[in-house]
Amino acid sequence: MTGEPMTTTTPAPSAVGPPPPFDLELAAVLDVLGDQMSLPVTVDMIPAMRASFAQWRTSDEDLSRGGAFEVQDLSVPGPPGAPAVSLLVCRPTATSAPMAAIYYMHAGGMILGDNRLGLPEALDWAQELNLAIVSVEYRLAPEHPHPAPVEDCYAGLVWTATHAGDLGVDPDRIIVAGGSAGGGLAAAVALLARDRGGPPLAGQMLMCPMIDDRNDSPSSRQMAGQGVWDRNANSTGWSALLGAGCGGPDVSPYAAPARAADLSGLPTAFVDVGSAETFRDEDVTYATRIWQAGGRAELHVWPGGFHGFDRTAPQAAISRDAKAARVRWLRRVLQA
């Protein structure tokens, strides 16, 4: 396919009620964290936020989990005319046979993070299911607007699939995965792979994915000023990625997958989201449209969950349930 595919139009706004309540355990965590989680996110805050994230960068020693994983940084060809892409590869040391792999895209609202962000949970999957993890470092907005992030991710996926044998990976069992911005990028990479005849994917795991730049769904308006990553923060992230075109009629579905007019022919999907977060309605709609196009999707809406609740409050009962559901889905897809 050449050029950009058709996109959907902006849905008409509808009246919304008050915000749904947070899960009691999660609400208690938000109360403790207070202003740390509810500060408005603006463009001028990005450097300080990046510096804060860098302080929590996961080390190779932590990623190796006592020698259970071999950790390797690779530099591979990027998109045409663009810099090389960094891939962080974590492979179980106890397995030599080709294994399934998670091709992982990190969170961060398109403006923050690196390819180590969020890997602890991915390594939990890898330990339980004997998987390799390949996490991609993509260029961040606003310095590198669309299509730089998604093209970096796609270039890394193509290299991973092409060199699967060298990595000890089964090329027929690669799942793209990510949370928040990374979930949006995973959905976009799945669209690119379909439209460009790229690597076949075994599935797409979209955890509270950031997929709609229009930022005007009922849940976006309902949760304004509430919880984590509200409508204001979302506007900052999307505007950094898309500039003046954000929310307009010409946004590519490879930037905002909710814009895609056609969701047929995609790999089986896992979509989860909290009921009390900005992305609720766009994510529910995305799963619904996959079904309507004849595809397969598993959808979980976690009652009272705010954005990224399972990382902020990992010991909460709802967080444990969410993590367990992801592992169950991975096991079913990879053993099918």
Image (spheres, rainbow, N blue to C red):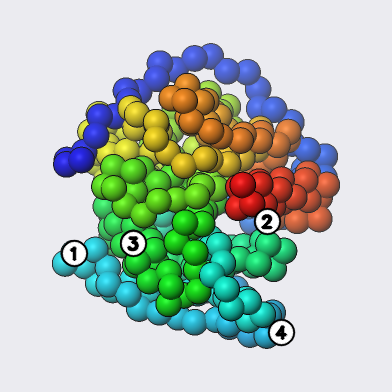
In terms of secondary structure, where does tag 3 sit?
A: helix
Who comes first in sequence, dot 2 or dot 1? 1
Q: Is residue 28 visible?
A: no
Who comes first in sequence, dot 4 or dot 1? 4
**Which is more toward the observer, 223 or 118?**
118
Q: CA distance from mark 3 to mark 4?
A: 30 Å
Who comes first in sequence, dot 1 or dot 3? 1
Q: Which mark is residue 66?
A: 4
Q: Which mark is residue 80?
A: 1
260 lies left or right of 284: left
Q: Position of residue 37 (x, y in %)?
A: 63, 52
Say which of marks 2 and 3 sits in front.
3
Q: CA distance from mark 2 to mark 3?
A: 29 Å
The residue beneath circle 2 is: 311
Q: Please report the residue visible at 62 percent of the width from the left and 34 percent of the height from the top.
A: 299
In terms of secondary structure, where does tag 1 sit?
A: loop
Say which of marks 1 and 3 sits in front.
3
Tell me whether the residue at label 2 lies in contact with that at label 4, contact meaning CB atoms closer than 8 angstroms: no
Quarter in which the N terminus is drawn:
top left
Mark 2 is on which residue type?
Arg
Who comes first in sequence, dot 2 or dot 4? 4
**Which is more toward the observer, 167 or 13?**
167
Q: Is residue 283 above or below residue 88?
A: above
Tell me whether the residue at label 3 lies in contact with that at label 4, contact meaning CB atoms closer than 8 angstroms: no
Mark 1 is on which residue type?
Pro
Tell me whether the residue at label 2 lies in contact with that at label 3, contact meaning CB atoms closer than 8 angstroms: no
81 lies left or right of 278: left
Q: Is residue 170 above or below residue 272?
A: below
Who comes first in sequence, dot 3 or dot 4? 4
130 lies left or right of 25: left
Q: Is residue 299 above or below residue 191?
A: above
